[in-house]
Image (cartoon, rainbow, N blue to C red):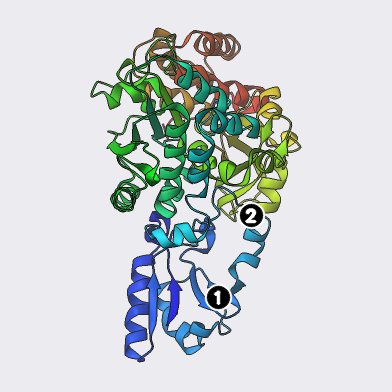
């Protein structure tokens, strides 16, 4: 029986994947053809969605982007055997967008049935966990440390050091918490992997539990991700039934289980201490540090808080070894980074590659330049609180240190592109407004500074004492940067200061009618 792969990733659903699947099923039935439809995750080439793949003797052949109106012509062209069609892209793996990638974290995403245990195990699943159990906690932590893995959620803190700190902290109980509150604009990697390869997160969290001696894990999922939550919940049930979670993981005697908790739409709960407060049933407000969550985290116990991408890297590191993982990347940025290319871009989607590509290669070569066809003017990396880089910075290698040297952040790997019609003073205003709306209100620099920032940008745009207010805005940014309790207020100045520095011509009298 021919297998047809149609994504059920929410981005594919948004452009009609369910309608395409229903049409293909109906057409096959009407023609008396035998076919099995597999609802896989997305491979991440969102410009090709809905991407339909057919399993043939030569490999999987892709067709996309497919709309319901294309289905009859696909059958007429014999697509079940890989027949020629205007929307045929050939072997999916050979498509330029995929052929150039180094897929470690996303090796199975878009390939397998997301909740099939046999599919997951057949492509290397659970091998990393088995090795972690075999070598024990100390060696597992040493392997992660040696790999050079750093937190993929923004701060870039060495993962192995965080795990060792928690493991060494005296306690009667320890926790693994996955930060799945992916709220940055232009980012979707966490969602994509949980929808397309949920067992990778279960395995990564369980490896962490082996390393630190945890018996309980929590996944904090943003409320806007119901599809991911449903898929992950199904995977948890099946993993428990198969013995990958529970009182005796893989017959090792390890007791570990995972629970998913839904957030309530607060951006600040992406900050680890606000997330912990929310998990405990309290209002999501930032905690003062110290103590660090590694010492006193969830329920005042030592807690590892990592995001999805950090945890799902662990199975690869344990299965294939620290040296293998560390062989990718540059400098202190080792391994691969899933780049999420979005905004005004021709080829938007997820592109996993080793650290070291330049920003220009990412935007112009991989992304294909702007969708509008106009010149790229600005690129924001690191979410809504990341710096705006001009074209002059297109030679910047995509790694932690290179971006930091230019007052930027790679954050969660989001890359949002703007063409030459963008008004950068308005984008600076948006950063301050965003911070004002999302602030938890605990500290004065963030709570008051962001509101005063919006007012100051408005005066600048109106031409009111422009020079004086530009000085005031700079001073306000410095106060927020160094005086805020957490990264929300501390990072809000990055887009503002970078817009002022690189696009100063936009900071003059402008109409505020659109605000």
Crowding at dot 1, Cα within 10 Å, few <14 / some 14-19 / many 20+, comes out as: some
Q: Secondary structure at mark 2?
A: loop
Checking the image for residue 87, the label placed there is: 1
For this rendering, which residue is in front, 36 or 425?
A: 36
The image quadrant that residue 18 belongs to is bottom left
Q: Name above or below for residue 65 compared with residue 167.
A: below
Q: Give the residue at x 44% y 18%.
A: 294
The image quadrant that residue 356 belongs to is top right
For this rendering, which residue is in front, 140 or 1?
A: 140
**Is residue 397 left or right of 81 when viewed as pictured?**
right
Compare marks 2 and 1 and give the one earlier in the sequence. Answer: 1
Q: Kindly indicate whether the residue at mark 1 contacts the one at mark 2 (C-beta within 8 angstroms).
A: no
Q: Give the residue at x 56% y 8%.
A: 475
The residue pinned by badge 2 equals: 373
**Is residue 168 left or right of 225 when viewed as pictured?**
right
Quick one: which residue is furthest to the bottom in this view? 32
Q: Secondary structure at mark 1?
A: loop
The image quadrant that residue 436 belongs to is top left
Residue 55 picture location, percent across and down: 51, 76
- The answer to whether residue 348 is seen in the rendering is yes
Residue 425 picture location, percent across and down: 55, 27
- The answer to whether residue 113 is seen in the rendering is no
Q: Name above or below for residue 263 compared with residue 22.
A: above
**Is residue 72 left or right of 84 when viewed as pictured?**
left
Tell me the quadrant of the picture where the C terminus can be found: top left
Residue 367 picture location, percent across and down: 63, 52
Residue 424 picture location, percent across and down: 57, 31
Q: Name above or below for residue 399 compared with residue 237.
A: above
């Amino acid at each position: 029986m021919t297998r047809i792969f149609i994504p059920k990733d929410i981005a594919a659903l948004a452009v009609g994947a369910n309608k395409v699947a229903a049409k293909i099923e109906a057409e096959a039935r009407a023609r008396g053809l035998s076919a099995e439809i597999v609802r896989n995750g997305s491979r991440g080439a969102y410009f090709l969605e809905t991407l339909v793949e057919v399993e043939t003797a030569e490999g999987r052949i892709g067709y996309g982007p497919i709309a319901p109106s294309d289905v009859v012509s696909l059958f007429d062209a014999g697509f079940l055997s890989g027949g020629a069609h205007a929307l045929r892209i050939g072997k999916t793996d050979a498509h330029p967008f995929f052929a150039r990638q180094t897929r470690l974290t996303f090796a199975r995403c878009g390939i397998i049935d997301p909740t099939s245990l046999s599919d997951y195990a057949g492509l290397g699943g659970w091998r990393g966990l088995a090795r972690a159990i075999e070598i024990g906690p100390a060696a597992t932590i040493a392997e992660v440390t040696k790999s050079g893995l750093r937190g993929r959620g923004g701060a870039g803190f060495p993962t192995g050091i965080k795990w060792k700190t928690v493991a060494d902290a005296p306690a009667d109980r320890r926790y693994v918490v996955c930060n799945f509150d992916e709220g940055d604009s232009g980012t979707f990697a966490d969602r994509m992997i949980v929808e397309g390869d949920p067992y990778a997160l279960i395995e990564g969290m369980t490896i962490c539990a082996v390393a630190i001696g945890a018996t309980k894990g929590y996944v904090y999922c943003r409320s806007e991700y119901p599809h991911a939550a449903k898929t992950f919940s199904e995977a948890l049930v099946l993993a428990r039934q198969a013995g990958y979670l529970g009182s005796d993981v893989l017959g090792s005697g390890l007791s570990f289980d995972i629970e998913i908790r839904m957030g309530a739409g607060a951006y600040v709960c992406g900050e680890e201490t606000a997330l912990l407060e929310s998990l405990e049933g309290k209002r999501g407000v930032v905690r003062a540090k110290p103590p660090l969550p590694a010492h006193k985290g969830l329920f005042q116990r030592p807690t590892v808080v990592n995001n999805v991408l950090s945890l799902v890297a662990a199975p690869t590191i344990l299965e294939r070894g620290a040296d293998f993982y560390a062989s990718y990347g540059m400098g202190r940025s080792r391994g691969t980074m899933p780049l999420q290319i979005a905004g005004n871009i021709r080829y938007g989607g997820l592109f996993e590659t080793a650290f070291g590509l330049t920003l220009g290669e990412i935007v112009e070569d991989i992304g294909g330049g702007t969708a509008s066809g106009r010149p790229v003017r600005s690129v924001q990396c690191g979410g809504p609180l990341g710096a705006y880089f001009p074209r002059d910075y297109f030679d910047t290698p995509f790694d932690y240190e290179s971006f930091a040297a230019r007052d930027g952040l790679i954050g969660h790997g989001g890359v949002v592109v703007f063409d030459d019609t963008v008004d950068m003073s308005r984008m600076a205003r948006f950063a301050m407004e965003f911070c004002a709306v999302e602030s938890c209100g605990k500290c004065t620099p963030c709570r008051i500074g962001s509101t005063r920032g919006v007012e100051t940008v408005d005066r600048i745009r109106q031409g009111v004492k422009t020079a004086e207010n530009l000085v005031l805005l700079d001073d306000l940014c410095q106060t927020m940067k160094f005086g805020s309790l957490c990264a929300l207020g501390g990072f809000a100045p990055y887009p503002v200061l970078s817009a002022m520095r690189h696009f100063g011509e936009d900071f003059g009298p402008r109409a505020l009618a659109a605000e």
